[in-house]
Each structure stands twice: as structure tokens, then as C-alpha cells.
Amino acid sequence: MRVFLDTNIILDLLLERDGFEDSIDLFSRQDEGKIQLSTSVLSMVNIAYVYRKTVGHALAVSNIKYLSALVEVLPMDGMMIQDAIYSKGKDFEDNLQLSCAEKGQCDALVTRNKKDFPAGKSPVPVYTPAEFFSLPL
């Protein structure tokens, strides 16, 4: 199963924010061969920006390099931007993430802010970590 991680899931792990244990569990499931984790190039850019401000440039670069070896980083293109613009979701960045997950043939998208994704109209099922963990794998 290919699982797309939204930016907030990865930042939870790196910054040890509330709920970071869920992020650890997702990466553990990948280590066990149960899922394959993906994220977007947009997420990596946003993660690097936020994380660098918190831990400094050198540590951020080191950890982002390590992270990019753990997850598949999916590209984005102009067609995805067009898809996001015309999507029914209310948040452009989330629409863009969803388009990337769809084009990357992901089976699920895991996020902490599910409310900003178009309910019931998503080409990729969107789950909170708790919802995802309740799925049979």
C-alpha cells in the first residue's frame, strides 16, 4: 500500500509535536514492509523551511537528506497546479497535495487536518492517523 504523508505528519515527527508517536508508527510499518511512504516535493520544501528555523541549517539539511532517503519524494507539475485550482477542496495547498498523491498512485493520504480536504470527493482516500491505523493492512 502506497501512503502519502501530508507535511504535518512529517513535521510532527521531526519536531516531536503532539501525536509524533503516530508518525513513528507509520515509519515503523514501512520498515516492516507493510506500507510504502511517499510525500511531495512541496512538502519537503515546506518541511525544510520550518525545520531549519527550529533546529538550524546544518541539522535540518542532515535530517532532510536522511528523510528523503526514507520516503519517496513525488514530483509536481503544472497540470497538478491546474487540478488543484479547479478542485472542490477549500485549501489550495491541500488540493495540490491530493493531486500529487493521485498522480503518484497512492492508495491513501494521511494528514492531521482532514477537514481541509474535499469530503467524499477525493480521488485518494484521506485519513487521520487513527483512521488509517484502523484499516486492515
Image (spheres, rainbow, N blue to C red):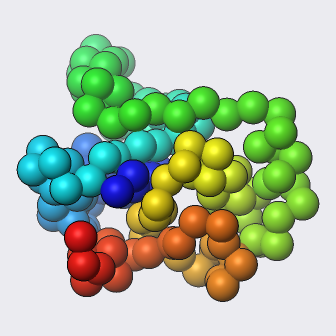
Q: Position of residue 41 (x, y in %)?
A: 55, 32
Report whether 90 appears left or right of 35. right
Q: Is residue 27 visible?
A: no
Q: Classify 86 as above or below 31.
A: below
Query: Residue at position x 67%, y 34% from top?
Result: 76
Residue situated in front as seen by the camera: 25 or 47 = 25
Report whether 78 appears left or right of 133. right
Residue situated in front as seen by the camera: 37 or 48 = 37
Q: Residue 128 sits in which quadrant?
A: bottom left
Query: Residue at position x 66%, y 72% from top?
Result: 122
Q: Is residue 134 visible?
A: yes
Query: Residue at position x 51%, y 72% from top?
Result: 126
How many marks overall? 0
Q: Position of residue 119 (x, y in %)?
A: 65, 83
Query: Residue at position x 26%, y 53% from top?
Result: 35
Report whether 132 appears left or right of 102. left
Q: Classify 118 as above or below 6.
A: below
- Name the outermost residue toward the top: 58
Report whether 85 appears left or right of 65. right
- Assign the C terminus to one quadrant of the image: bottom left
Q: Classify 83 as above or below 63.
A: below
Residue situated in front as seen by the camera: 123 or 112 = 123
- Assign the N terminus to one quadrant of the image: bottom left
Q: Position of residue 32 (x, y in %)?
A: 9, 50
